[in-house]
Amino acid sequence: MAVNRDDGLLAAQERYARWLAWGTRSGVVLLVLAFILYVTGAVVPYVPIERLPELWHLPAAEYLHRTGIDPGWHGWARLVAHGDMMVLAAIALLIACSIFCLAGVVPLFWRRRERLLALVCLLQIAVLVLAASGLLAR
């Protein structure tokens, strides 16, 4: 029996869309919850809200220096127990949704022998992870 290429592409599109819908909804819920915890003071922020007006106008490097946060994702990730860093973590989850979705369709393409599409997805994942790593910024 011949495999219909359109069915495979449709299955990949549906999986990507399902995972993206789930990931973005989850990310938005986490973002709202983290923001509520942050602004209510239920979880103590790393940078007190009262200090933000004096820091907002600064370039990012100076902001990080004055607050003692290391540059890159590892700088805030180690502080994720603080309310403001929880908000950043939720934003990072939203940003990473496409990586998870791409990873989800790779096996579908591979099983259907769509090696080029699987490779393109893997290369996109590699580029996104490399960009997020901060290695290129140094």
Image: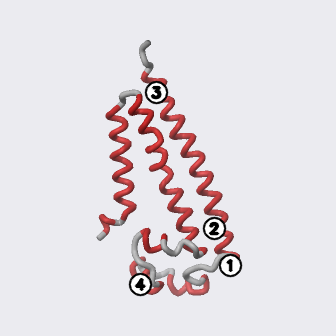
Which callout, 3 or 2, points at the residue further toward the start of the chain?
3
Residue 68, percent from left and from top:
45, 84
The three-letter amino acid code for the residue at tag 3 is: Gly
Residue 135, percent from left and from top:
31, 65
Calculate the distance from the C-alpha at mark 1 to the C-alpha at mark 2: 11 Å
On residue 41, which mark appears? 1
Which of discs 4 and 3 lies nearer the camera? The answer is 3
Calculate the distance from the C-alpha at mark 3 to the C-alpha at mark 1: 49 Å
Tags 3 and 1 touching, CB below 8 Å: no
Which callout, 1 or 4, points at the residue further toward the start of the chain?
1
Which callout, 4 or 3, points at the residue further toward the start of the chain?
3
Calculate the distance from the C-alpha at mark 1 to the C-alpha at mark 4: 24 Å
Relative to 77, residue 101 above or below: above
Tell me where residue 47 sits by quadrant: bottom right
10 Å crowding of disc 3: few (<14), some (14-19), many (20+) = some
The three-letter amino acid code for the residue at tag 4 is: His
Relative to 37, residue 97 above or below: above
Identify residue for label 4. 65
Which callout, 3 or 1, points at the residue further toward the start of the chain?
3
Horizontally, is 130 left or right of 56 in the view? left
Residue 41, percent from left and from top:
68, 78
Q: Nearer the viewer, residue 32 or 58?
A: 32
Calculate the distance from the C-alpha at mark 2 to the C-alpha at mark 4: 24 Å
On residue 8, which mark appears? 3
The residue drawn where x is 62% and y is 60% is: 30
State which quarter of the image contains the N terminus: top left
Identify residue for label 2. 34
10 Å crowding of disc 4: few (<14), some (14-19), many (20+) = few
